[in-house]
Amino acid sequence: MTESAPSSDRRLLLVHAHPDDESINNGATMAKYAAEGARVTLVTCTLGEEGEVIPPALAHLAPDREDALGPHRVGELRAALRELGVTDHRFLGGTGRYRDSGMMGAPQNDRPECFWQADLEEAAGLLASVIRETRPQVLVTYGPDGGYGHPDHIQAHRVAVRAVELAADPALRSVGGEPHRVARVYWNCVPRSAVAPEVFAGNPFPRAADPCDVPGVVDDAAVAVRVDGGPGCASAKAAAMRAHATQVVVDGDWFALSNHLGQPLHTVECYVLPPGDHVPGAPHDDLFAGVFE
């Protein structure tokens, strides 16, 4: 941090596909910057209606039964954000504007109301309006493959990239607000060293995930920023993940999704830059490194 960039002047926007993605990918990062006084805004693109429900007592919420999982996950997300200290959250276009698309190749991909079928310019315009309102210097989202090929993650990437362009366009008036240029865009990632086979030793779940099951793995040399918020932010991240009880089981320093494969709960969160972007001196420990210079 420099004298010209006090915490209160830092503004971070994160764009995620479903409730729980923010806590798993960026929970420690969000907690750190929120605690430091930065403005942290989360935009979630769907309610996660097509998620698989882990607790048997909540199985009735599933999309093939009551189809009430989406509203339930709204409550989980609110609880998670309280743990992270984040108060500015929006669903893209309003609550329920876009429905979860399900996994790639599922019949749900073809529903006209699903996020995968969203008109890119329309969805990006909605996000561009948020960008112009909140005026973030840094935006975080997924890489082009969404980390693991989920259609909503891929679409979130596409929408975020286009929204950054639209928000900066002085000729565009339909989204309201004054033009704003996002200084830096980062993509979530996991360094290869963090998923080395030996890292999975001590897994408390019946089975451990294979390193290839972890989304967004990159070579360590590609990492541009490593954010470590310390024990307090690590605890906040674990608590936020526990709040997403329909989707995540946390056991100490480990967690599992509905596949019941244990994997480490990463409290040092890593980010890469899009190809062609460069920040001198990387890797840094701050997403805002160089932004105010």
Image (tube, rainbow, N blue to C red):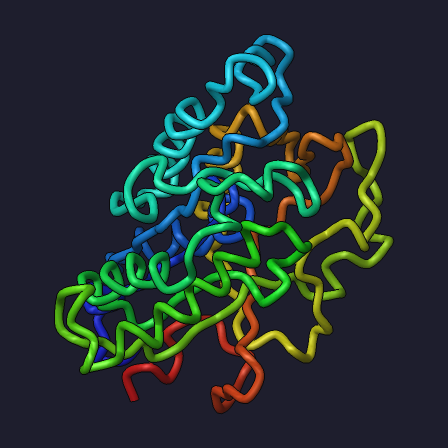
Residue 39: percent from the left, percent from the top? Answer: 25, 58
Residue 210: percent from the left, percent from the top? Answer: 84, 48
Kindly tell me whether residue 236 is visible in this rendering.
Answer: no
Query: In the image shown, does 269 or 252 lie closer to the viewer?
Result: 269
Query: In the image shown, does 187 or 196 lie closer to the viewer?
Result: 187
Q: Is residue 117 above or below residue 290?
A: above
Residue at screen point 19% across, 82% down: 170
Q: Is residue 34 above or below residue 63?
A: below
Residue 281: percent from the left, percent from the top? Answer: 51, 88
Q: How many marks?
A: 0
Q: Quadrant of the C terminus?
A: bottom left
Query: In the image shown, does 254 or 186 lie closer to the viewer?
Result: 186
Residue at screen point 37% across, 74% down: 288
Residue at screen point 48% across, 87% down: 279
Residue at screen point 50% across, 77% down: 284
Q: Quadrant of residue 265?
A: top right
Query: In the image shown, does 122 or 249 lie closer to the viewer?
Result: 122
Q: Quadrant of residue 147?
A: bottom right
Q: Quadrant of the N terminus?
A: bottom left
Residue 192: percent from the left, percent from the top? Answer: 75, 65
Kindly tell me whether residue 121 is visible in this rendering.
Answer: yes
